[in-house]
Image: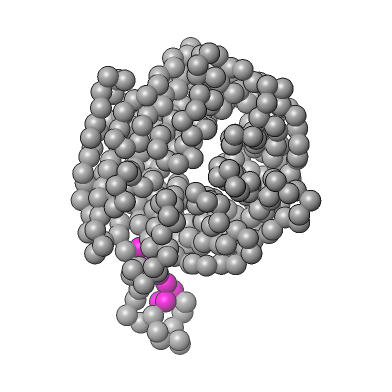
Amino acid sequence: MNLNNSTYGNGLLHAAFNQDHGCFACGMESGFRVYNTDPLREKERQDFDGGIGHVEMLFRCNYLALIGGGRLPHYPTNKAMIWDDLKKKPVIELEFSSEVRAVRLRRDRIVVVLDTMIKVYTFTQNPQQLHVFDTCFNKKGLCVLCPNSNNSLLAFPCRRAGVVQIIDLANTEKAPLEVTAHEGSLNCLTFNHQGTRLATASEKGTLIRIFDTSSGAQLQELRRGSGSAAIYCISFNQDSSLICVSSDHGTVHVFAVEDAAKNKQSSLASATFLPKYFSSKWSFCKFQVPNNAQCICAFGADANSVIAICADGSYYKFVFNQKGECTRDVYTQFLEMTDDDARS
């Protein structure tokens, strides 16, 4: 979640979960912070005399990828820095001729997203460039890298609008899989934890589609709403039975993926003469984030809970039941915490 144009004035520039959603990191106008997701605790705070516009964690290990950002970037925005939190300094620096839009990490690879290409490097003291992949103009830095040690898939928007390219970095001689996900340009991509499913949303934001990453077959089409929306985040739970989705409408939706019958459907769904809209599968649960704040979402430590991390510095934990009824369980302002605080 990039917040360089945020109107809240709280210094928050970026927020993102780590690969298993157990932590989230924030880029600030004056450094970066790392939090435990559930229960909420501040784990690390690094103060700089400049801004960090992007932070990428690698599970809970000591390496983070940083990109400068904000009013006074701490690092040039055309550099990707790998920070060692044990040494409290950058240990790898990769420089490019254009701005770095995002960085993705796994234990053996550094993936750098530029405006029209993606570069893949070894994660070593002196990184070696392994691959270069062309993309469409990708200012959002859309790119997902499967963190699973048994699956090396990389997915990103290719040069044709709405099409996702999936590449197996462990076998790049294998032809890439191209998935025609949407008619319009892509706005959000995510893998499940195992890398067997890919969820996508377009800039229109009305539909979430889920694909099998081995065949490219569409498995589910889920409707967020009837009106356009900017999808900020899609997250699978640990066993890929549910997804949660946040948008600029200030809502977080929860859909069933494995047991799709849980999702709501119109009573007219079986009428074949009606438009496809009437057969849509809608979320079985949704909740409203106060003040319609931009947020990222993920499932919490409890199977029936969702965490929302918001641009205004608020943290919410919602719990829901099988009927789709939900209640707010926790609320706090995470930017005002110190590392001595804890919230349950």
Decide whether residue 199 is among the magenta residues.
no
Tell me where residue 136 appears, x and y as whole percent.
68, 48
Quarter holding residue 211:
bottom right
Tell me where residue 139 appears, x and y as whole percent.
61, 40
Residue located 60% across and 67% down the image: 217
Left or right for 75, reference 332: right
Tell me where residue 17 appears, x and y as whole percent.
44, 38
Residue 1 visible in this rendered orientation of the protein: no
Instruction: State the scheme by which the image is colored.
Output: one colour
Magenta extent: 277-283
- Numbered circles on residues, count: 0
Decide whether residue 281 is among the magenta residues.
yes
Image quadrant in which the C terminus is located = top left
Residue located 54% across and 57% down the image: 197
Tell me where residue 200 appears, x and y as whole percent.
53, 56
Q: Is residue 65 above or below residue 325?
A: above
Residue 109 visible in this rendered orientation of the protein: yes
Task: Decide which of 317, 246 is in the foreground and name it.
Answer: 317
Residue located 49% across and 40% down the image: 19
Q: Which residue is situated farthest in the right direction here? A: 173
Residue located 44% across and 83% down the image: 274
